[in-house]
Image (tube, rainbow, N blue to C red):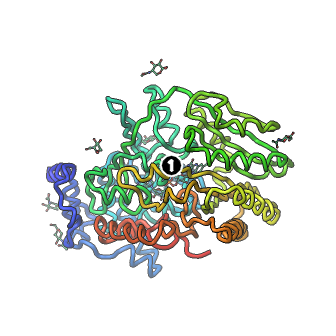
Amino acid sequence: MKYAVSFAALVAGAVSQATFEPADFNVTEALLDNGVNVSAIPELAPLAERSLLSGCSIAVSTRLYDLSSKLTNRQCNSLKLIFGDDQVETRSESAYSAFVGAYWSAQQRQLSPQCVFKPKKALDISTSILLARLTQCPFAAKSGGHSAVAGGSNIEGGITISFENMSKTTVSSDKKSVSFEPGQTWYDVYTALEKDNVTIIGGRVSRIGAYHEYGLACDNVLAYELVTASGLIINVSEKSFPDLYWALRGGGNNFGLVTKFTVNAIPRAPTMWGGMRTHLPTNFTALTKAYYNLGMNANKDGKAHQILSFGWGRPNLGPVAQLELEYSDPVADAPVLAEYNSIKGAIADGTGVKSLSTLTSILAGPATGNGLRQGFWTWTTTLDLEMANTARDIFFEELPSIMDAAAIIPALSLQVITEPIIEQSAKRGGNPLGLDPKEGPLMLALVSLKWSDPADDERLNTFARRVQDRSSAAAKAAGKMNDYLYMNYASPYQNVVAGYGAANQAKLKTISKKYDPTGVFETLQPGYFKLDGTPSGEF
Ligand SMILES: Cc1cc2nc3c(=O)[nH]c(=O)nc-3n(C[C@H](O)[C@H](O)[C@H](O)COP(=O)(O)OP(=O)(O)OC[C@H]3O[C@@H](n4cnc5c(N)ncnc54)[C@H](O)[C@@H]3O)c2cc1C
Ligand SMILES: *[C@@H]1O[C@H](CO)[C@@H](O)[C@H](O)[C@H]1NC(C)=O
Ligand SMILES: *[C@@H]1O[C@H](CO)[C@@H](O)[C@H](O)[C@H]1NC(C)=O
Ligand SMILES: *[C@@H]1O[C@H](CO)[C@@H](O)[C@H](O)[C@H]1NC(C)=O
Ligand SMILES: *[C@@H]1O[C@H](CO)[C@@H](O)[C@H](O)[C@H]1NC(C)=O
Ligand SMILES: *[C@@H]1O[C@H](CO)[C@@H](O)[C@H](O)[C@H]1NC(C)=O
Ligand SMILES: *[C@@H]1O[C@H](CO)[C@@H](O)[C@H](O)[C@H]1NC(C)=O
């Protein structure tokens, strides 16, 4: 009852934002508001008296893992007591192994959380965050589980909160907006929307979780339902919490756990054009030029989307280019794609008119590489033909040094952050990414690697880092470097938030202090890109 009252007050915006979490905030009382009486749970009763003492965190920092896992165990047992066995998987259960074994990257599969918690609604998440504060046991949150950052969405010895049982999608009656929960892939969301003839701006690969667009899909989010550090469930929009809304559009997992997104719906035909083509080196120059020109022409027709990737065709094809093209209408020969379409000689061509959900499935390709070790590195320059050619040449120059690594699948992917995309960023109060329309379209480069042997980690990271360093050095020399790093593509050795610029970084920290004064989402949830530093130190 008490909970219902405070929730209503917040939705109405009646809570004082200046003291979002009072200094004397009492976790035990907040849990009581959620209907959880800590004193009545034998394993937690001894903790009821305290509000913010350290338990697990002290244990972990002094490497007393025994104590740490005992405390975490208490929390797992308490979760079972409160929510039932169905919603909590512990290490001895087969559902636990199935869960951990389903992460995209080997690095995340290697982590063993103490238990996996599967909330069904925002209030469950609120309770689990408050319990984590009470026991000071660390947690991670998993949506699609495709982060390439080890510990990004799984946690050794902590609690992994999985959104898999929160996966509703609803279209508003006027069809102007769509609400969806985070526990589903873009394929699920697109499929659910197809019958209503609407879509939303999301990711391109079907298996990827719906929370992957920290980047630019964020500019189409109208509201985030967010569970805060003090367990409050609030509806964050430009009107209700403008500063927090700004921070969520690029600030990563540092401000709360999102339990629902409300986004703009876009009317659409049931089908669109797109697919993949594979080309040989004879076409590399022409493809790179077409990539550049399409990026420069985005002002004329924003319906086209491209990813130009370079890699290695196995078993003995050698260097290949893989081009992914989409046009958001079911038009096979859009004039803006004429230059690309004039490049004949593709050795495979899967383009055609298809449904968006089919397209995202096709673009995902066969599940090759799922469960391998994964590495991403990214950088950004001004969109420039010479920079694109240089990056491609450096990638192929460095490649021989790693081709003997077991199961290696290397790629360099070039995308464009177009001028219209950057202009969209300014809508509804802007975002923290630090992109400036005056800098013109940008080239977003990603080196991605898959491999199987941990003994190769070091040299493969060295390879990616070298390609990035050499390309960046060329860009700097030409005055074309940009500090922005796309969070979804960054390596755990890159400092994403610093790349947003000092002013944006400082503002994000101020907003975090206001809504999460004790730093729950930065310290108790240690994984992924925090507001300071890199996830894995220096490389
Ligand atoms: C094959 C492939 C294709 C890709 N294509 C694209 C693409 O087209 N566009 C693009 O932008 N990126 C793309 N990516 C990158 C992808 O967006 C990132 O890896 C992204 O982090 C994956 O999201 P997820 O939900 O699957 O990840 P998860 O690992 O589940 O989560 C990533 C991070 O988000 C946090 N998080 C998860 N759920 C929540 C929540 N509800 N509230 C708050 N924080 C939460 C987690 O703590 C974690 O740190 C691709 C990656 C792969 C592997
Ligand atoms: C909480 O549980 C304790 C122990 O069972 C009990 O004494 C107390 O009255 C309960 N508090 C509330 C608010 O129900
Ligand atoms: C928090 O609230 C509980 C329950 O009301 C109380 O027993 C406890 O003393 C409080 N803790 C602090 C630190 O005030
Ligand atoms: C959660 O969803 C899975 C499918 O992803 C289903 O098998 C399971 O029964 C659900 N669990 C609960 C507790 O609802
Ligand atoms: C969606 O569009 C198709 C084809 O244009 C049409 O037949 C169908 O009735 C539409 N569905 C809805 C729910 O509007
Ligand atoms: C949250 O805010 C959005 C945007 O203002 C609104 O459309 C939505 O109805 C709100 N949700 C709730 C639960 O109040
Ligand atoms: C593309 O490559 C093919 C041979 O693989 C060649 O015939 C054709 O001229 C090339 N086209 C361009 C525009 O480079």
Foreground: 302 or 514?
A: 302
> Does 36 sit above or below residue 208?
below
Foreground: 444 or 60?
A: 444
> Does 426 sit above or below residue 174?
below
* Outermost bottom residue: 62
Q: Is residue 426 left or right of residue 414?
A: left
* Residue 431 figure quarter: bottom left
Question: Which amino acid, by three-letter code, is at mark 1?
Answer: Ile
Does any portion of residue 180 appear in the rendered image?
Answer: yes
* Residue 348 figure quarter: top right
Q: Is residue 140 left or right of residue 444?
A: left
Ligand 2's image quarter is bottom left
> Does 386 sit above or below residue 271?
below
Rendering coords of residue 195 (x, y %): 46, 25
Q: Secondary structure at mark 1?
A: helix
Rendering coords of residue 509 (x, y %): 37, 70
Q: Quadrant of the C terminus?
A: bottom right
Give the residue at x 14% y 49%.
1
Rendering coords of residue 374 (x, y %): 64, 58
Foreground: 68 or 299?
A: 299
Give the residue at x 47% y 69%.
501
Rendering coords of residue 153 (x, y %): 49, 58
Give the residue at x 84% y 51%.
318
Q: Which residue is mark 1?
A: 421
> Does 89 sit above or below residue 274?
below
